[in-house]
Amino acid sequence: MRTELVVVGAGPAGLAAALAADARGVRVTVLDGADGPGGQYFRQPTAALDARRPRALHHQWRTWERLRDALATSGVRVLPDHHVWYVEAGSGAFTVHALLGPEQEEPVTVHADAVLLATGGYEHVLPFPGWTLPGVVTAGGVQAMLKGGLVVPGRTAVVAGTGPLLLPVATGLAAAGVRVAALVESADPRHVARQARDLAGKFPEAAGYAARLLRHRVRPRTRHTVVRAHGDDRLTGVTVAALDAGGRVRRGTGRYLPCDTLAVGHGMLPHTDLADGLGCRPDGPTVAVDAEQRTSVPGVWAAGEATGVGGAQLALAEGHIAGRSVAARLRGTEPDPAGWAPAARTRARLRRSADALAAAFTPPAAWTGRITDDTLVCRCEEVTAGAVREAVGELGAGDVRTVKLLTRAGMGWCQGRMCGAAVAGLAGCEPAPSRRVFARPVPLGVLARAEPEPEPESEPEPRVDNPEPREENPEPPREGPQQPERGPS
């Protein structure tokens, strides 16, 4: 298959980029692992469920309607159930390798002149005693169940961790009929107040969530954390306790809350596997981009959570800018920043808000001290916190890679996506780039029969190189502030 631009990811950033490039005559193909466009944020119930009011599950339904309708009338080709595992850079061109379908056993390759990575993010997971019990779910996982499956994980829930994602999760559970026993937020409200200037635009949204929590009689507990999850075969309750200014548990403040569901989350992390494999320059945990959303690799752009977690509106603005830049560069012209000036202003404003949120909602500084040695850290390889501590304290491991070699932490199916941050925290090291060649596990059979494919010399569906630009969506809508969403949400 041959196209001009491959967009990896059909969330807000990917769709905005695809529509902007398509409106300027670029042949665009979007690959996404889900069964339809929308990403985690605009996740839709499956058609078989025949949802009567899907808009009730979304904060920005009108935005999704505009994207959906624009996509339907565009020339963008969307390929769902395509799980991209490698992007191969050639001489001025790229080959995108994907696995097709739920079984992920049928290989597909797409050749393109440019690639735009809109790979989103995934949840920051921190372990604690009892976190592997059935009934303990990530906050984004709960939101995915509500949006995609129209199901609830239990009857009584505690929502805990830190970050703005906890608010929609708690209100969504309560609206679905679940009794939310508590919303446990580890952040100090004073830290949020210090960021008031940059967060002013988000206060109306927060007030709306607060009103809904009050209506459902959900009690927020700030500067608290979950100390332990209890149960034998499944979750029966949690112990929560207050935190002091240093993030340590205050003695004598523990309280047991019975529940059958714990939705826990500590924010989001950028998904950069494909960018790392291409050799894109990192900027800390994110992909470094310039004002046009270009990476350090010629022909590769990135937008959305991979360049910094900031929510759907920020992703829309970045995607719009990236799509316009790609279209100009592919046509051999210099992009005109004045054309995307409104989106650039939105990007700057929302990036400041995202940075303020990241500063206000950080995991408790002393979280590692609450992890007992018998607590599993890497679930895939069943590596305990004690094994990680032994690798550092007794075997001399000084970085995450050495800990991995000594303990196998991060060598399992998820390749460290779930446990990487926790292992680094316990080891006292900075998280390291993955540097893995493939972005996901690939069947050996696929690799064994993989052969270089000659690029087709002609395109079966030619399009005029410089058509009159079609009408497209204006600047990404400003329907109020938005919390980060993903990975799983």
Image (cartoon, rainbow, N blue to C red):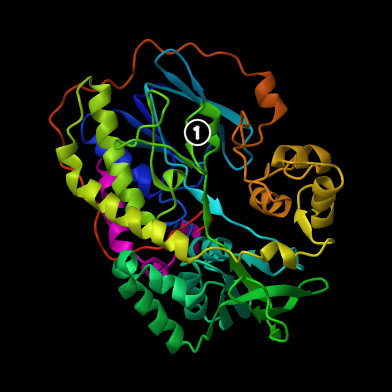
Percent position of residue 81, x then y = 52, 41
The residue positioned 30% from the left and 22% from the top of the image is: 461
Q: Residue furthest left?
A: 468
The residue positioned 58% from the left and 56% from the top of the image is: 124
Main secondary structure along the magenta-highlighted residues: helix
Percent position of residue 487, x then y = 52, 53
Q: Is residue 80 left or right of residue 468?
A: right
The answer to which image quadrant residue 58 occupies is bottom left
Q: Is residue 318 left or right of residue 256?
A: left
The answer to which image quadrant residue 255 occupies is bottom right
Q: Is residue 13 above or below residue 159?
A: above
Percent position of residue 468, x then y = 12, 30
Q: Is residue 16 visible?
A: no
Q: Secondary structure at mark 1?
A: helix
**Is residue 58 found inside the magenta-colored segment of the image?**
yes
Q: Which residues are magenta?
A: 47-74
Q: Is residue 384 visible?
A: yes
Q: Is residue 434 left or right of residue 23?
A: right
Which residue is tagged 1? 275
